[in-house]
């Protein structure tokens, strides 16, 4: 997906809310608010997701909480189906202290990638997608430098948090 393109609506059907409870309906982009949205994709068995991705996400959630920024996490399952299961969502949510929605995205029938991966043309995990308030994808990549990201948004960068 080229940057600047409209973000497709989420097609993930299985979600837990910030308290770890199953949602009554699938999460939609509008549920994340009117501002910027960050969607973090992971797989439970992905070492980089745990060593880099989740710590980055934790920093951004702390820095942007209450500032009109919406967050969601999606386990995009495209391999390791026996390890990257829906029952891994809540323990992962608790492990990182993230009271934000977590989704479980599996492959549509006959597809080699998960629905989000197909819709957003992601490259694997960990993967960060940022959507602007106008609904355009403005960032999509494996790595996201939290200090540079906050500076680009005109946000203060807390000292000592970004090493």
Image: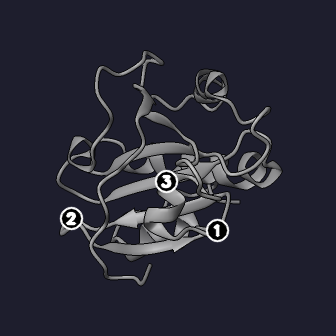
Q: Residue furthest front?
A: 110
The earlier-in-sequence mark between 3 and 2 is 3
Count numbered badges in the picture. Answer: 3
Q: Nearer the viewer, residue 24 or 158?
A: 24
Q: x%, y% of residue 60?
A: 49, 52
Relative height, residue 15 to residue 121 (above, below): above
Q: Give the numbered dot on residue 133.
A: 2
- The answer for how far apart the CA atoms under marks 2 and 1 are is 22 Å
Whether 40 is drawn above or below 155: the answer is above
**Mark 3 or mark 1, which has the lower sequence index?**
3
The Cα atoms of the two marked residues, 3 and 1, are separated by 18 Å
Callout 3 touching callout 1 (CB < 8 Å): no
Say the numbered circle drawn on residue 142: 1
- Residue 127, image x and y in percent? 60, 61
x, y percentage for residue 86?
Answer: 61, 27
Where is mark 3, residue-wise?
115
The crowd level at tag 3 (other Cα within 10 Å; few <14, some 14-19, many 20+) is many
Q: Residues within 10 Å of mark 2 (few under 14, many from 20)?
A: some
Query: Is 112 left, or right, of 115 in this rendering?
Result: right
Of labels 3 and 1, the one closer to you: 3
Among numbered discs 2 and 1, the one appearing first in the sequence: 2
Q: Is residue 61 above or below residue 125?
A: above
Residue at 78%, 50% in the rendered image: 51
Label 3 or label 2, whichever lies nearer to me, is 3
Residue shown at 71%/50% (left/top)?
49
Q: Dot 2: what SS?
A: loop
Residue under the point 72% across and 36% down: 84
Q: Secondary structure at mark 1?
A: loop
């Amino acid at each position: 997906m080229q940057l600047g393109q409209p973000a497709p609506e989420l097609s993930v059907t299985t979600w837990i809310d910030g308290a770890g409870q199953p949602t009554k309906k699938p999460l939609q982009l509008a549920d994340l608010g009117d501002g910027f949205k960050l969607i973090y994709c992971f797989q439970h068995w992905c070492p980089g997701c745990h060593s880099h991705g989740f710590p980055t996400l934790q920093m951004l959630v702390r820095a942007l909480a209450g500032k009109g920024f919406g967050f969601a996490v999606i386990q995009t399952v495209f391999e390791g189906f026996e390890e990257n299961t829906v029952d891994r969502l809540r323990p992962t949510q608790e492990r990182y202290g993230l009271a934000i929605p977590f989704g479980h995205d599996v492959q549509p029938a006959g597809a080699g990638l998960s629905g989000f991966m197909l819709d957003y043309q992601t490259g694997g995990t960990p993967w960060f997608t940022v959507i602007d308030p106008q609904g355009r994808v403005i960032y999509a990549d494996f790595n996201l430098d939290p200090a540079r990201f906050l500076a680009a948004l005109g946000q203060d960068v807390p000292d000592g948090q970004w090493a």
